[in-house]
Image (cartoon, rainbow, N blue to C red):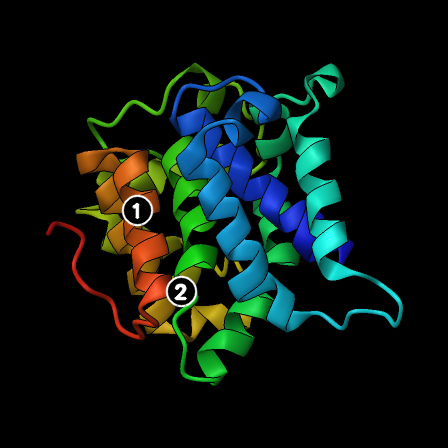
Amino acid sequence: MKVRLLNGTHSLIAYLGALRGVGTISEAIATPEIESAARAVLRREYEPSVHVPSGVDIRAYEEQLFERWSNSALGHRTAQVGTDGSVKLGQRIPEPALLALDEGTMPHLLALPVAGYLSCIAPLPGFAPGPHARDMVDPARARLAAEAQSARNGADLAHRVIAEQHLLGQGLAERPDFIARVGELVDTIAGHGVEAAIRDSIAASEHGLTETRGAHR
């Protein structure tokens, strides 16, 4: 529960917040679209993948998480939480994403933090992710940034780092549908902004869309 519900959603908030120019987690979660994305990924894509222990009130636990993230006294920075994403995302994304894919559902909201991570650490040419993204430290930054500089688009970048370099492990490396969805969202972030990518992901999740839909609509 902790690794996925708390840590996984924490990553989403950090990358989306940084791309929106927000320096702290509390400021990020105060942004309505980021809060909506966080609640949606928790309920629709993380919760179905965890076993809730007997006696645990999942809704109460969820509200405790949002209270924690909203606490400005903690001072958690988006750059701090987004650091080492090449390690953290591999622990937080693959299992719930593969579970959804194996059930015939595209995990649009799990693809979103992956696209956010790539946009922060390895932005496409011409896209400036902002100072909070630049402050993130990642052992894979130089390698992934080099791939981004020669990538044709988000789909090309996502294929290189997920399929070829196994950023998220072997299982997702073999799921071209998920990789294509990440690529679409990278292009949406670069071309239309992170808010557009959030709206896209939430809408697709609400309607249960199982296929990629094209980044520019």
Nearer to me, 156 or 50: 50
Drawn side of residue 203 relative to residue 85, left or right: left
Kindly state the secondary structure of the residue where label 1 is placed: helix
Classify mark 2: helix, strand or loop.
helix
Q: Give the residue at x 25% y 49%.
A: 154
The image shows residue 151 at horizontal and vertical percentages of 23, 45
The picture places residue 165, in percent across and down from the top left corner, at 46, 57
Amino acid carrying mark 2 in the image: Ala
Q: Which residue lies most toward the left here?
A: 217
Residue 169 seen in this snapshot:
no
Percent x, y for residue 48? 61, 72
Residue at image location 70% in from the left, 34% down from the top: 67
Query: Mark 1 packing: few (<14 Cα in 10 Å), some, or many (20+)?
Result: some
Rendering quarter of residue 85 = top right
- Determine the residue positioned at 31% across, 36% down: 195
Q: CA distance from mark 1 to mark 2?
A: 26 Å
Residue 37, percent across and down? 46, 46
Q: Return the residue at label 2.
A: 163
Q: Quadrant of residue 188?
A: top left
Extreme residue in the bottom direction: 103
- Horizontal side, residue 78 vs residue 57: left or right: left
The numbered mark at residue 199 is 1
Across the whole image, how many numbered discs are drawn on residues? 2
